[in-house]
Amino acid sequence: MARSNIAYIEIGVLAHATEDPDKVLKAARNLLPPSHVDQLSFRRSTLKGEYGNPITLYKAQIGAPELAEALLKGIFSNLSVLDRETLLSELEMRLKKGNFYLRLDKQAAFASKCKLGRADPIHLRIKFRTSKIEAIREICQKTGMFP
């Protein structure tokens, strides 16, 4: 992947009052190869849920090209063929102004597995340096995102 293709990757994950924040962060860190885990630091924000329950939002931004590449290759190499086909078919829906939005299952990530998720996921926003869909499709194919 060329240095200039991805501007940054933002990771966001919520820890609800019933969840152990350390386990939630472990799930998010499990997305990275072990050699890069120490390079990821999360900012913490406290939010309130609909009924006043405390929710903690953890966010991290990855700007280093080698870390961004390691994250993407790790995720996409561990997604099932079905999940990668889903990403390919939903590419235009997941893109907005050069941002590619991805949700991964938090429970699977805790178990060091990658799969798409919808309920209480780990959110990723991949900011490309281009907003042209064909250029983004080509970049994604080079990273192994699509089967």
Image (cartoon, grey):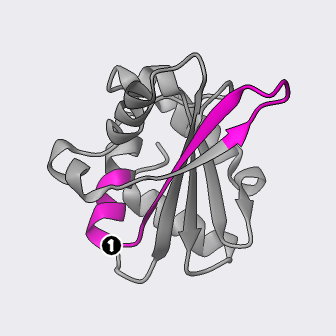
Quarter that holds the N terminus = bottom left
Residue 52 rendering spot, x and y as whole percentages: 80, 28
The residue to which callout 1 is attached is 65
SS type, badge 1:
helix
- Residues shaded magenta: 47-71
Q: How many discs mark residues in the rendered view?
A: 1
At label 1, the amino acid type is Pro
Q: Nearer the viewer, residue 27 or 97?
A: 27
Does residue 38 appear to the left or right of 26 in the view shown?
left
Does residue 86 appear to the left or right of 139 in the view shown?
right
Q: Is residue 51 magenta?
A: yes
Residue 50 rendering spot, x and y as whole percentages: 85, 29
Q: Nearer the viewer, residue 141 or 70?
A: 70
Is 46 drawn above or below residue 38 in the view shown? above
Residue 98 rendering spot, x and y as whole percentages: 66, 72
Q: Nearer the viewer, residue 59 or 31?
A: 59
Q: Residue at x 73, y 25 (%)?
A: 53
Is 80 drawn above or below residue 77 in the view shown? above
Quarter holding residue 48: top right
Q: Residues within 10 Å of mark 1 (few under 14, many from 20)?
A: some
Q: Residue at x 21, y 52 (%)?
A: 38
Q: Is residue 118 magenta?
A: no
Q: Residue at x 30, y 45 (%)?
A: 32
Q: Which residue reaches farthest top? A: 18
Residue 139 rendering spot, x and y as whole percentages: 48, 67
Quarter holding residue 137: bottom right
Q: Which residue reaches farthest right? A: 50
Q: Residue at x 58, y 16 (%)?
A: 18
Q: Nearer the viewer, residue 108 or 20?
A: 20
